């Protein structure tokens, strides 16, 4: 690993979360000289995180290709079905993975397991510089490179910078890339519960008048839940004792999983939509939540970031073969165009779902119920949406 203080690197990655670390792994495997920096200490493992992720089949295949999947400490739980229901309505949409014959719809993994697997994968990388507990204070570019000055006084130079520093991206602001944030006035309450009845590897998405409630299958008779609630109601719900909260879950969701008991912590965080008019500028590109942050209703946020990594690392591999400049406007413009449909369509559809199912209008309730039944009954349309949900279209 190059340790020369001002050596010209191939790529600098800002942000050591899941998306940034995954990009570092992908580019390191391609032989590129990479530096990755973050305000946190990379060596500190996640503890008591509480988050779980639904990893689509497409994302799982990519993580397997990079050798990360095999390093997961616990066996991921397959998702064989997705069942979407509307509160007090008989309309439903059921996805069964057997209809495509490709394998499960996806898998459930915990944030702590994924963090451990990524760290294990990165530990043997010989061409990655890890810059810990530091942040950028100045950034400037010229015709051939981009230079970053960090708070510690350290200077990093590369042909390209990748911003993976989250929805409140500092690099995005320094680059002058405008973003727009739409608050949903909701908080997501997340946690893990055990239940009396088996989940049969079904991921449930249940829309209620207060916000969507999802149950995602974990090992045994346990499931992760994500309950998106109006802010005032979420604050009240967070004050309830575990037993009282579980009673609220049962009365809202019904008897499908039986009675609930808490396993671990209950956490809450605010929800919003963040979009950017442009995701690239001079020798810089945004990926993951720095480029797009969405509501968790579809469970696709991390998967969209993984597809960013796969797409852009592939673009850099092709540029490397041809001896092209990694920060060239043409390369960045082509990447932006290649990702536009996936990013825009997913952000728009997720935002639309929240607006549609969050409206108590009788007419809209009838329309969304009819929509669920319609998609469920038209096989080609249903298979199209299934492939989107699996990340294999």
Image (cartoon, helix red, strand yellow):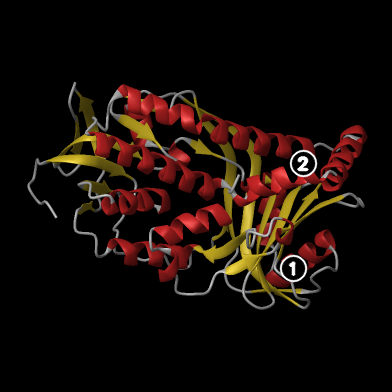
Task: Name the residue nearer the viewer: 184 or 145.
Answer: 145
Quadrant of the rendered structure where residue 100 is?
bottom right
- In contact (CB < 8 Å): disc 1 and disc 2: no
Task: Name the residue nearer the viewer: 176 or 116.
Answer: 116
Task: Name the residue nearer the viewer: 175 or 231.
Answer: 175
In the rendered structure, the answer to whether residue 124 lies left or right of residue 52 reads left
Quadrant of the rendered structure where residue 98 is?
bottom right
Which quarter of the rendering shows the C terminus?
A: top right
Q: Earlier in the sequence, mark 1 or mark 2?
A: 1
**Mark 1: secondary structure:** helix
Q: Which residue is disc 1 drawn over?
A: 246
Report how far apart the C-alphas of labels 1 and 2 lie in the structure: 36 Å
The disc at residue 380 is none
Task: Name the residue nearer the viewer: 106 or 226.
Answer: 106
Q: Residue at x 19, y 53 (%)?
A: 127
Quadrant of the rendered structure where residue 130 is?
bottom left
**Mark 2: secondary structure:** helix
Q: Which residue is disc 2 drawn over?
A: 381
Q: Residues within 10 Å of mark 2 (few under 14, many from 20)?
A: few
Which quarter of the rendering shows the N terminus?
A: bottom left
Residue 18 lies, in percent from the top left, at: 41, 53
Q: Residue at x 74, y 57 (%)?
A: 99
Q: Residue at x 66, y 39 (%)?
A: 350
Number of on-image labels:
2
Q: Residue lying furthest left in this view?
A: 4
Residue 370 lies, in percent from the top left, at: 89, 40
Query: In the rendered image, is residue 209 in sight?
Result: no
Residue 101 lies, in percent from the top left, at: 68, 60
Above or below, 278 relative to 115: above
Q: Residue at x 58, y 45 (%)?
A: 270
Q: Nearer the viewer, mark 1 or mark 2?
A: 2
Residue 145 lies, in percent from the top left, at: 18, 29
């Amino acid at each position: 690993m190059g340790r020369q203080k001002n050596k010209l690197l191939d790529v600098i990655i800002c942000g050591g979360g899941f998306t940034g670390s995954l990009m570092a792994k992908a580019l390191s495997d391609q032989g590129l000289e990479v530096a990755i920096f973050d305000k946190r200490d990379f060596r500190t493992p996640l503890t008591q995180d509480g988050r779980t992720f639904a990893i689509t089949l497409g994302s799982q295949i990519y993580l397997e290709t990079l050798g990360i999947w095999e390093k997961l400490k616990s066996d991921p739980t397959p998702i064989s079905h997705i069942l979407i229901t509307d509160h007090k309505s008989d309309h439903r949409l059921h996805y069964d993975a057997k209809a495509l014959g490709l394998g499960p719809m996806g898998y459930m993994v915990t944030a702590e397991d994924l963090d451990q697997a990524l760290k294990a994968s990165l530990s043997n990388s010989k061409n990655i510089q890890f810059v810990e507990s530091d942040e950028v204070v100045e950034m400037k570019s010229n015709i051939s490179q981009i230079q970053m000055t960090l708070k510690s006084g350290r200077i990093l130079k590369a042909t390209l910078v990748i911003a993976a520093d989250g929805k409140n991206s500092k690099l995005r602001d320094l680059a002058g890339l405008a973003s727009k944030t739409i608050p949903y006035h909701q908080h997501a309450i997340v946690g893990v519960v055990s239940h009396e009845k088996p989940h049969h590897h079904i991921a449930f998405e249940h829309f209620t008048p207060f916000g969507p409630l999802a149950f995602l299958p974990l090992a045994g008779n346990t499931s992760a839940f994500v309950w998106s609630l109006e802010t005032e109601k979420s604050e009240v719900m967070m004050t309830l004792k575990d037993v009282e909260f579980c009673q609220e879950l049962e009365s809202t969701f019904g008897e499908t999983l039986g009675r609930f008991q808490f396993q671990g912590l209950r956490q809450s965080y605010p929800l919003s939509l963040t979009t950017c008019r442009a995701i690239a500028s001079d020798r810089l590109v945004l990926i993951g939540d720095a480029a797009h942050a969405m509501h968790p209703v579809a469970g696709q946020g991390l998967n969209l970031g993984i597809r960013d990594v796969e797409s852009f690392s592939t673009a850099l591999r092709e540029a490397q073969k041809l001896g092209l400049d990694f920060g060239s406007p043409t390369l960045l413009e082509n990447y932006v165009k290649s990702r536009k449909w996936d990013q825009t369509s997913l952000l728009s559809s997720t935002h639309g779902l929240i607006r549609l199912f969050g409206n108590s209008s009788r007419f809209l309730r009838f329309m969304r119920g009819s929509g669920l039944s319609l998609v469920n009954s038209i096989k080609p349309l249903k298979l199209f949406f299934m492939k989107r949900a699996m990340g294999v279209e």
